[in-house]
Image (spheres, helix red, strand yellow):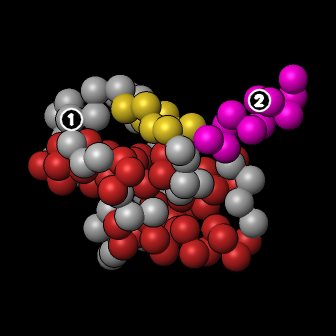
Amino acid sequence: MRTAGRDLKKRIGYMSQMSSLYRDLSVAENIRLYAGVYGLGRRETRERTQWVIEMAGLAGYESKPAVSLPMGVAQRLALGCVLVHRPQVVFLDEPTSGVDPWVGAVSGISYSNFPM
């Protein structure tokens, strides 16, 4: 059963309406933390961190603590943390609630067409 849980964790991503970010960690540290939670190795973590920063438009925010981010930017970071491990299925809980238009646009994209 433990292996089934690990396999399931690798296949799904969940973005809650409430922030799942660690407020005192920087943008890059949050991404690396979630990469580690999902079991990515060092090389893949570096690659996926860069991918999240580019995909979510976070360039220039890498060293800023999550607590200092505007709500829309924080929501983009949270989405990047959900996608860092390339899940097959993503559950979004109210993804457009109070966020910038970028996240609203992303939530309407067919996941099968989303560049991973």
Q: Which residue is mark 2?
A: 5
Q: Which residues, given as a range, are shown in magenta?
A: 1-11
Circle 2 — which element?
Answer: helix
Q: Tell me what residue is drawn at x 40 percent, y 69 percent.
A: 53
Residue 18 in the figure: left or right of residue 39: left
The single residue placed furthest to the top in the displayed view is 1
Which corner quadrant holds the C terminus?
bottom left
* Side (left or right) of 76 relative to 41: left
Image coordinates of residue 18 in percent, x first then y, are: 38, 28
Q: Position of residue 34 (x, y in %)?
A: 60, 51
- At x 29%, y 46%, the residue is 110
Amino acid type at circle 2 is Gly
Q: Position of residue 32 (x, y in %)?
A: 61, 61
**Residue 3 placement (x, y as % from top left):** 85, 34
The amino acid type, in three-letter code, at marker 1 is Thr
Q: Residues within 10 Å of mark 1 (few under 14, many from 20)?
A: some
Is 28 situated above or below 13? Answer: below
Q: Residues within 10 Å of mark 2 (few under 14, many from 20)?
A: few
What mark, if any, has residue 96 been given in the picture? 1
First reached walking from the N terminus: tag 1 or tag 2: 2
